[in-house]
C-alpha cells in the first residue's frame, strides 16, 4: 500500500526513482561517513593497525541498515522497490 501511485512501467519514472533512491542513499552515507571519521579519530584506544578494519566494519553495517531503511521508506511512500524486497 503506497501513499502515491505512479506508473513504474514508464522508463522515465523508473529511472527517476532509481536516481532518487541512489542520491538519498549516497547523501546519507557520505554525511554519516564524516561523523564516523570524526568519532573514530578521537578514540585513543584504536591503533593504526585496527582503525581501517573498525571503520570498514562500521561503514558496512551502516550502509546495510540505511539501505534497508530507505528501501522500505520508498516502498511505503511510493510503492517502489519490489525488486529489492522480493
Image (cartoon, rainbow, N blue to C red):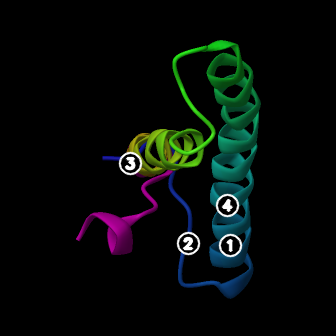
Mark closer to the observer (1, 3):
3
Mark closer to the observer (4, 2):
4
Marks 3,2: beta carbons within 8 A: no
Measured Cα–Cα span from mark 3 to mark 2: 23 Å
Label located before the other in sequence (1 or 3): 1
Residue denoted by label 2: 7
Label located before the other in sequence (1 or 4): 1
Query: Quadrant location of residue 65?
Result: top left
Measured Cα–Cα span from mark 3 to mark 4: 13 Å
Residue 47 percent across, percent down from the top left? 57, 32
Label 4 CA crowd tier, 10 Å (few <14, some 14–19, many 20+)? some
Residue denoted by label 3: 68
Residue denoted by label 4: 22
Identify which residue, 48 or 78, lies in the foreground: 48
Label located before the other in sequence (2 or 1): 2
Residue 71 percent across, percent down from the top left? 44, 51
- From the image, which quarter does the C terminus lie in? bottom left
Measured Cα–Cα span from mark 1 to mark 3: 21 Å
Q: Is residue 25 left or right of residue 56?
A: right
Q: Which residues are magenta?
A: 73-86
Identify which residue, 2 or 61, lies in the foreground: 61
Mark closer to the observer (3, 2):
3
Q: Residue at x 70, y 51 (%)?
A: 26
Marks 1,4: beta carbons within 8 A: no
Measured Cα–Cα span from mark 1 to mark 4: 14 Å
Marks 2,1: beta carbons within 8 A: yes
Query: Quadrant location of residue 61?
Result: top left
Amino acid at each position: 500500500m503506497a501513499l502515491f501511485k505512479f506508473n513504474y512501467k514508464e522508463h522515465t519514472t523508473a529511472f527517476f526513482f532509481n536516481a532518487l533512491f541512489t542520491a538519498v542513499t549516497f547523501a546519507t552515507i557520505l554525511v554519516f561517513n564524516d561523523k564516523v571519521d570524526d568519532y573514530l579519530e578521537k578514540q585513543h584506544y584504536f591503533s593504526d593497525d585496527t582503525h581501517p578494519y573498525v571503520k570498514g566494519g562500521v561503514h558496512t553495517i551502516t550502509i546495510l541498515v540505511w539501505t534497508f531503511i530507505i528501501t522500505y521508506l520508498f516502498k511505503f511512500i511510493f510503492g517502489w522497490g519490489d525488486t529489492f524486497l522480493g
